[in-house]
Image (cartoon, rainbow, N blue to C red):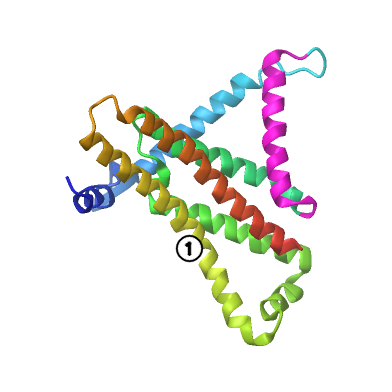
Amino acid sequence: MNIKELLNEILLKDKALIHLPFGDGKFDIYESVVVTWIIIAIIFVLLLFLTRDFKLHNISKRQAAVEGFVLWVRGIVDGMLGEEASRYTDYIFTVLIYIAFANMVGLFGFIPPTMDINVTVALSLMSIILVEAAGIRKKGVGKWLKGFAEPMAVIAPMNILELAIRPLSLCMRLFGNIIGATVIMELIKHVLPVFLPVPFCLYFDIFDGLIQAYVFVFLTSLYIKEAVE
C-alpha cells in the first residue's frame, strides 16, 4: 500500500459510527464523538477514584501524588499564561488533559478524535473565541478594536487577517501532526514484522501525542497572554 492509497483510506473513510433513523433520512453520530464520550467517562471515573476520601490533614500517598501532579501541571500552565491571565488556567488545563487523552487512545485500538478535522476546528474556535474575549474583558471593546490598527493603521487588514489565520493554524497543526503520525505507523506496520512497530507506537501515541497537546495549549496560552497585555 502506497502513501496515496493510505491517505485516501484514512481521510475518505466513513467517519459515522452510529446511524439513527431521522425522518426520511438518518442521523449520524461520528466515531470521534463516541470516542470523546468514552474519554470523558474515563476521566470522570479517574477523578472519582483519585479524589476519593481527600482530607485536609494526614493525607494519603495517593492524595499527595494527585495534588503534586495537579500543582505541577498548573505551575506549567501558569508559567505560560503569566500572572494577568491566570484566570484562564483551568480552561488550558482541561484542554491539555483532553487532547493528551485523545491523542493516546490509539494505544487501545481507538481512532484519535483529533484525526477528525471537525474536532480540531471546534477546539481551535473555542480557544480563539476565548482569546478575543480575554482581550475584550481586559481592554474593553473600544481599545480592543483600536488594537487592530497598532502600531499603524495601514496594517489593520493584516491584523484582521491574523484573527482568521490563528484558528486555522491551531487546527491544521494538530490535525496534520496526528494524521502524519498515523500514516507513518501504518506504513511501518506494512514494512516491519508484527512486534517491531511497538516502540514506534509508544513514541507516536504517547510522546508525540503529549507534545502535540502541549504545543496546542502553549500557543493558546501565548495568544491569551498577548491579548491581555
Of 25 and 54, nearer the camera is 54
- The answer to whether residue 71 is above or below residue 46 is below
Magenta stretch: dominant secondary structure: helix
Q: Can residue 80 be found in the magenta stretch? A: yes
Describe residue 77's horizontal placement relative to residue 123 as left or right.
right
Rate crowding at label 1 as few (under 14), some (14 to 19) or many (20 or more) other CA atoms within 10 Å. Answer: some
Quadrant where the N terminus is found in the figure: top left
Describe residue 68's horizontal placement relative to residue 99 as left or right.
right
Which residue is outermost to the right? 57
Q: Can residue 103 be found in the magenta stretch? A: no
Which residue is outermost to the bottom? 154
Of 216 and 188, nearer the camera is 188
The secondary element bearing badge 1 is classed as helix
Describe residue 194's horizontal placement relative to residue 33 as left or right.
left
**Residue 29 in picture, x, y percent from top left:** 34, 44
Of 106 and 145, nearer the camera is 106
Describe residue 12's horizontal placement relative to residue 164 as left or right.
left
**Residue 125 in picture, x, y percent from top left:** 53, 58
Q: From which residue to which does the magenta span run?
A: 59-84
Residue at horizontal 51 percent and vertical 39 percent from the top: 210
Residue at horizontal 70 percent and vertical 79 percent from the top: 150
Of 30 and 203, nearer the camera is 203
- The answer to whether residue 141 is above or below residue 22 is below
**Residue 85 in picture, x, y percent from top left:** 75, 53
Q: What residue type is labelled 1?
A: Leu
Residue at horizontal 60 percent and vertical 41 percent from the top: 94
Q: Name the residue under label 1.
A: 168
